Image (cartoon, rainbow, N blue to C red):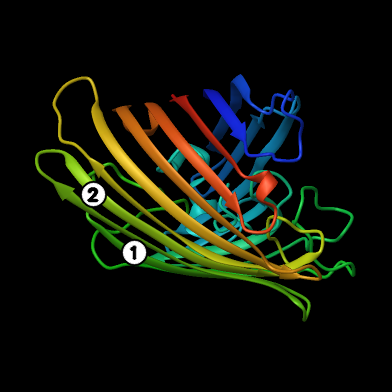
Amino acid sequence: MRTSFVHTEFDDEDVSEDADTNTDRFLLDSARLYVNGSVTKTIKFTFNTEYDGSGDVEIMDAVGQFVLSPKANIWVGRFLPPSDRANLYGPYYAHHWNVYQDGVQDGYPLIFQGRANGAMYWGQFDKLKLSIGVFDGPTLANIGGAGNFGGDDGDLLAAGRIHFDFWDAEDGYYLNSTYYGDKNLLAVGLAGQVQGQDHSAWSADFLLERKAGMNGAYTIEAEWARYSQLGSYLGGPYDANEGGFILGSYLFPGSGAGRWEVLGKYAQANFSGALPQETTKTTEINLNYIIKQFNARLMMFFLDKRFELSESSNFWKIGAGLQLQM
């Protein structure tokens, strides 16, 4: 689960002085149940659900996995399609608390939590990973959420990703935003999705992580993405979304129950279309206490978001989040 307490303040100049635009809330951000197992030596099955704070429990993953060899894997059902690193690590394996709020990472079209229905091949060739698949294409009617639009003709969506690790290899299809000093990483990835002739999304991501001291580490993560009539965040009159982010962190060495970590992230996204271009700038600072990597961590955060045109939408928030897994 992921649960948090958040204080939020909006810079809303249009409301009266008596109006209270500040909020203090305890949130159950997410709760998941994972089920997986083997049907035979080469056939596996995964079924995951999530409550995401909206009031409903949704099917997140339902995938049949045919594992012929590390170089030949076939997946069929609902799962994360080839996309950016951020989509492939999700909130539970992200480095910072406030994921997917910057208009850059994980803007690919989705059914639920980055997932899509389709079929995919992926293979690992030592430090090189390849994945390619075909999925139900989003239409104006069948994809929920602002900005997750595609064509209206029902075309299938083609997705692919190429990933290379120059230092230690990352095994498996899914990725992490950090390995908390367990690996020395220099990784780059390119991903793209195309539907029909006019709808496309592209991204390039980078991760560098080096061990420091006894069990400390420093990390640099970055991404550039462009969503052109496919995916995006704001949607509506904006048919293109382009931007990037950079994140840096330092995990202090330690030998007790946990280790402290400081983290900073800056992102800028530009939205263009029928209206004048909107630009958002997002800054986040974390002070994290890592007890057992992704299975137990306390994350204290500050996030500030600025809108160039819609200044009344500017806000900042401060809070603390707890994540537990087993």
Q: x, y percentage for residue 156?
A: 78, 68
- The type of residue carrying mark 1 is Ala
Q: Is residue 324 visible?
A: no
- Observer-nearest of 170 and 275: 275
**223, above or below 181, in the image:** below
Q: Where is residue 132, by image quadrant?
A: bottom right
Farthest bottom residue in view: 197
**38, above or below 87, in the image:** above
**5 relative position to 139: left or right:** left
**200, above or below 10, in the image:** below
**202 relative position to 216: left or right:** right
Instruction: Tell me which residue sits at (23%, 63%) in the image.
Output: 167
Instruction: Tell me which residue sits at (14%, 47%) in the image.
Output: 212
Farthest left residue in view: 213
Farthest front residue in view: 17
Query: How far separated are the C-alphas under marks 1 and 2?
Result: 14 Å
Q: Is residue 237 visible?
A: yes
Q: Secondary structure at mark 2?
A: strand
Q: x, y percentage for residue 100?
A: 57, 47
Instruction: Tell me which residue sits at (67%, 60%) in the image.
Output: 119
- The type of residue carrying mark 2 is Tyr
Q: Which of the labelled discs sits on residue 218, or is there none?
A: 2
Instruction: Tell me which residue sits at (56%, 47%) in the image.
Output: 305
Residue at image mark 1:
187
